[in-house]
Image: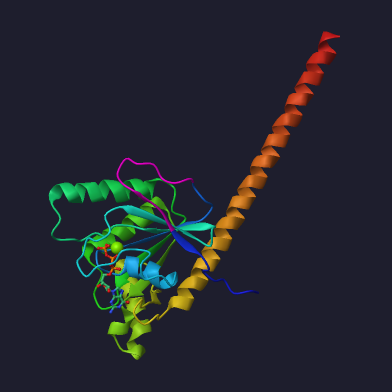
Amino acid sequence: MKQFAINQASFVTSVGQGQGYPAPLACEIAVVGRSNVGKSSLINCLTNNRKLAKTSQTPGKTRLVNYFLLNNAFYLVDLPGYGFAKRSKDEQTEWGDLIGGYMQSGRPKHLFLLVDIRHEPSPEDRQMFQWTLHAGVPFTVVATKADKISKSQRMIAANKAAKLLGAPAFAIPFSAEEKIGKDALIERIGQIFADAEGQAQRQAETELLFASAAEAFAEMETAQADEESE
Ligand SMILES: Nc1nc2c(ncn2[C@@H]2O[C@H](COP(=O)(O)OP(=O)(O)OP(=O)(O)O)[C@@H](O)[C@H]2O)c(=O)[nH]1
Ligand SMILES: [Mg+2]
């Protein structure tokens, strides 16, 4: 089978609180995690474009829900991070509404939950994981900045981070800096995309089946009514 690849990426739009999302596609994958964990860097690494998503050493760079179109077929969504200490109460409420609204929107088909491979997940990471379970969205844990620890420790540390999050003990170690785990993540996206497309197709087929059944039923009723009136 031909390997899945990312061959196109472009910015679509930024969505703030109360604003509309772009027209939905069968597949939408969102990247979530605390500020500075490397969400925007991950998107740039996957798309081979250092300038696509804005990154910064200062936490709190991404403030809106940023939509990117990949392969002219699916969305990869960059979300603002949490756990940003310098945020005011109002900003935190705004963030909660924005992310909460997005999580409940039914739009994300899959979440990449990012945790820093070096640190124990924070209470907010665990809270985000609980939201994910609550929203019923499938997820993959990704342990970022894997270049910061020795090669022999990466898998162990990544899996441990997932376990401490409360998830099954499996995570993909990843580094945007050294492109560690890039192929694994692209392969994962390929699976998620294929699943979402399959699901959308099955749904379309079911709707068609229902529509033709309803049509047949209506025809039968008309014929019966005609018979009775004769
Ligand atoms: N060493 C190392 N640094 C990284 C890696 N990924 C990101 N960084 C650095 O971490 C910082 C934050 O990266 P961003 O991608 O902007 O983080 P973010 O999660 O999008 O942050 P917010 O937009 O604030 O939520 C930047 O200085 C990046 O260069 C990585 O894989 N390895
Ligand atoms: Mg960002």
For this rendering, which residue is in front, 67 or 11? 11
How many numbered discs, if any?
Answer: 0
Q: Is residue 222 left or right of residue 78?
A: right
Q: Position of residue 230 (x, y in %)?
A: 86, 9
Residue 168: tell me if it is visible.
Answer: no
**Residue 156 image-quadrant placement:** bottom left
Residue 19 in the magenta stretch? The answer is yes
Q: Position of residue 30 (x, y in %)?
A: 40, 59
Residue 121: tell me if it is visible.
Answer: yes
Q: Is residue 17 left or right of residue 3?
A: left
Residue 144 in the magenta stretch? The answer is no
| Ligand 2 sits in quadrant | bottom left
Q: Position of residue 117 (x, y in %)?
A: 30, 77
**What secondary structure is the magenta-colored segment mainly?**
loop
Relative height, residue 43 to residue 197 (above, below): below
Q: Is residue 34 left or right of residue 26?
A: left
**Residue 105 image-quadrant placement:** top left
Q: Residue at x 43, y 72 (%)?
A: 48
Relative height, residue 222 to residue 10 (above, below): above
Relative height, residue 131 to residue 7 (above, below): above
Q: Position of residue 139 (x, y in %)?
A: 42, 62
* Magenta span of residues: 11-23
Q: Residue at x 51, y 69 (%)?
A: 6
For this rendering, which residue is in front, 122 or 15? 15
Q: Residue at x 77, y 19 (%)?
A: 222
Q: Which residue is the extreme one toward the right?
A: 230
Q: Quadrant of the N terminus?
A: bottom right
* Colour scheme shown: rainbow
Relative height, residue 121 to residue 13 (above, below): below
Q: Which residue is the extreme one toward the front?
A: 51
Q: Which residue is the extreme one toward the top?
A: 229
Q: Residue at x 82, y 12 (%)?
A: 228
